[in-house]
Image (cartoon, helix red, strand yellow):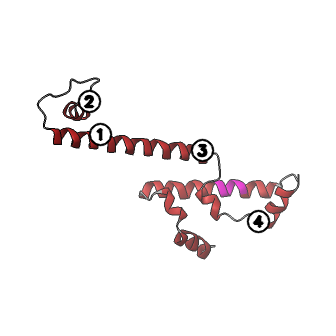
Amino acid sequence: MSRFKRHLAGIRGDVAPCAQVPEKVKEEMSKLIGVKRQMKEHKEEALKQLRRESTQKGLIDRFYIPTFEEALRRGKNVQPTINEKLKEKERERTIQYIARWFYEVGIPFNAASLESFSLMLDAIG
C-alpha cells in the first residue's frame, strides 16, 4: 500500500511516478506520506525517551516510600540486615505481580502515573 501511495504521489525511488494522476491526488498522497513519516518519527522518539528512562526509576518507584531504616542505610555505608534483604525481595515480587496484572488486564502502564492510582495505593496501605 505504501508503494502505491508513493506511486500516486509521484515520489521516485522504488516505484515509478504515475504520470496520469491528478494534482489534487498527488498532494493528498504526499500529505498522507508526510503524516505517516511524522507519526513514525514521533513514535521512534518516544521509544528513545523510554529507553533512556528505563535506567531510571519506574512509575511504581514513585509511590514507594522507603522505611526509616532504608533511608538511614542509604545515607551511610551500613550493611543491610537479612530482614531488609527479605523485604527488598518481597517488594520486587510485589512490583512484578502488579506489572503482570497491568499487562494481563490490558491497562497501560502509564495509568500508574494518575493521582487516583496513588490515592488507591495510599488507601490500601
Residue 90's x, y, as percent? 67, 57
Tell me whether circle 2 and circle 1 mark residues in contact (CB < 8 Å): yes
What is the three-letter code of the residue carrying label 2? Ile
Most extreme residue toward the front is 23
Between disc 2 and disc 4, the foreground one is 2
Whether the magenta-drawn stretch holds residue 113 is answered as no
Q: Earlier in the sequence, mark 3 or mark 1?
A: 1
Q: Name the residue under label 1.
A: 33
Q: Does the magenta stretch include residue 90?
A: yes
Q: Earlier in the sequence, mark 4 or mark 1?
A: 1
The residue carrying mark 4 is: 67
Q: Is residue 12 above or below residue 114?
A: above
Q: Position of residue 13 (x, y in %)?
A: 29, 23
Q: Nearer the viewer, mark 4 or mark 3?
A: 3
Q: What amino acid is at disc 4?
A: Thr
Residue at 20 percent across and 32 percent down: it is 4
The reply to whether discs 2 and 4 touch (Cβ–Cβ < 8 Å) is: no
